[in-house]
Amino acid sequence: MNKKGLLVVMLVVLSACKSMDVEEASGSRAIYNGNNSVLYEAQREIDSPDEAMGMAALAYQAGDLDQSLFQYLRALELDPKRYQALVWVGRIHRERGNLQLAELAFSEVLASAPNNIDALTELGLLNLGDRNQLKAEELLFKAVTLDQQRQANGKLGKTPEAAGLKVDSRSPVKAYNGLGVLADLSKNYPQAEAYYRLALQIEPRSALVQNSLGYSYYLAGRWEEATRAYQQGITYDSSNKALWRNYGLLLARQGRYEEALSAFEQIESRAEASNDVGYVCLIEGRLDQAEQFLRSAIEQSPSYYNTAWDNLNRVQQIRKLRQSAASAAAAPAVAAAQ
């Protein structure tokens, strides 16, 4: 699909989103208010791609993804080679769950600019999320290769090894982080850590990378280091849901249940937090503790919290299986005693 066709498809999607917004605005509350309303008051036609890019960035920072998407598409219409605008179109669609449109945007960039590092990184991460590890590695490694060539580093080999690489503030932090995730999936934890360390050189206060590093330590059984990584990440971004969830899971596995509940409650209700701690206890085989937390979840939200009931049923089923196994094991001993 050429860029004109892509613009038509994305503008149709955008128009649908904005129509829904207009309907909602006519109801009990207007969704375009506060800082966002300023952006919608700018009715004059923007005829500069730089101005459109600036408006798009402001809208994105304000959380107004419709306006941001519209302005990035406007920038692309004014300058078809403004590939960064199309990369941002893809990012916005990915955030909204429109993964096919996101892939289309990134692929369109690479069709015209095959060495665009941002598009390579974003498409690699899409493939990683889709569990296409080989394609993800190919794309992310190409992004890193181009980054190393930019720095005139001749130490990069034919396989994605972190040793000998160098980075700077312009390096694609998400590409290095993504290669770390791939190394974790292969259980190559030292290699994963090396990539995360490179990523932290690029962006020292990255909550994303700290979360990845903490999870890598968790997988490797280095729980104290995982704890420190999660805590450090939370100081960088205390609203990061992935950090709080992984930290809560780690605390629950360590038997630090009250701390785990507190961590989960940063991102969900007390009932959900109790269920999550109970579920960790369930998969760890700690049935008494699992039952305690699951019953607590049900008591806090008996009308709708079916998940806790399902997990409690699993606890009871495992208990029955254990009792049956114990009875079967004891039977020969009784017979022999007679």
Image (tube, helix red, strand yellow):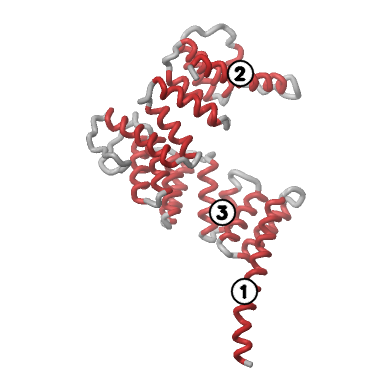
Residue annotated with mark 2: 12
Q: Earlier in the sequence, mark 1 or mark 2?
A: 2
- Using the numbered discs, state the Cα–Cα distance from disc 3 to disc 2 in whole angstroms: 45 Å
In the rendered structure, which amino acid carries the disc numbered 3?
A: Ala
Mark in the foreground, 1 or 3: 1
- Residues at marks 1 and 3, CA–CA distance in whole angstroms: 32 Å
The mark that comes first in sequence, 1 or 3, is 3
| Amino acid found under the numbered disc labelled 1 | Ala
Please state the horizontal and vertical placement of residue 99, each as a whole percent of the image: 54, 31
For marks 3 and 2, the one nearer the N-term is 2
- Furthest residue to the bottom? 338
Residue 328 relative to residue 150: left or right:
right
Q: Residues within 10 Å of mark 1 (few under 14, many from 20)?
A: few
Pick the quarter of the image with the C terminus.
bottom right
Cβ atoms under marks 3 and 2 closer than 8 Å: no
Tell me how far mark 1 sits from mark 2, CA to CA: 61 Å
Whether label 1 touches label 2, CB < 8 Å:
no
Q: Which residue matches tag 1?
A: 325
Q: Are marks 1 and 3 in contact (CB under 8 Å)?
A: no
